[in-house]
Image (tube, rainbow, N blue to C red):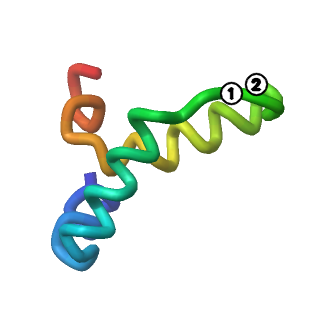
Amino acid sequence: MFRGEFLRKYFQADIRNKKVVEFMELKQGDMSVAEYAVKFESLCAFSPHYNTLEA
């Protein structure tokens, strides 16, 4: 919750939008499942569709 509010307030909109695109295009590729999970969770904070209490 704090992280999401912090990111919304202090990250510029264009940077947030780039992170959303990066999240939507994320593919595992050569990453291990653990590496992919870390990347997914870090980018998930930028996506309003996945960054909810219900998700």
> Disc 2 versus disc 1: distance between alpha carbons?
7 Å
How far across and how far down the image is residue 7, in percent?
Answer: 28, 66
Is residue 24 shown above or below 46? above
- Residue at x-position 53% and y-position 34%: 26
The residue where tag 1 is placed is: 28
Going from N to C along the chain, the mark reached first, 2 or 1, is 1
Q: Nearer the viewer, residue 15 or 46?
A: 15
- Residue at x-position 19% and y-position 68%: 13
How far across and how far down the image is residue 46, in percent?
Answer: 32, 50
Quarter of the image where one finds residue 10: bottom left
Quarter of the image where one finds residue 15: bottom left
> Residue lying farthest top?
54
Secondary structure of residue under mark 1: loop
Is residue 8 shown above or below 54? below
Badge 2 density bin: few <14, some 14–19, many ≥20, Cα 10 Å:
few
How far across and how far down the image is residue 53, in percent?
Answer: 22, 29
Q: Nearer the viewer, residue 41 or 23?
A: 23
Answer left or right for 6 relative to 28. left
Residue type beneath disc 2: Val
Residue type beneath disc 1: Gln
Quarter of the image where one finds residue 48: top left
Secondary structure of residue under mark 2: helix
User: Which circle marks residue 10 in the picture?
Assistant: none
- Residue at x-position 27% and y-position 37%: 51
The residue where tag 2 is placed is: 33
- Residue at x-position 68% and y-position 33%: 36
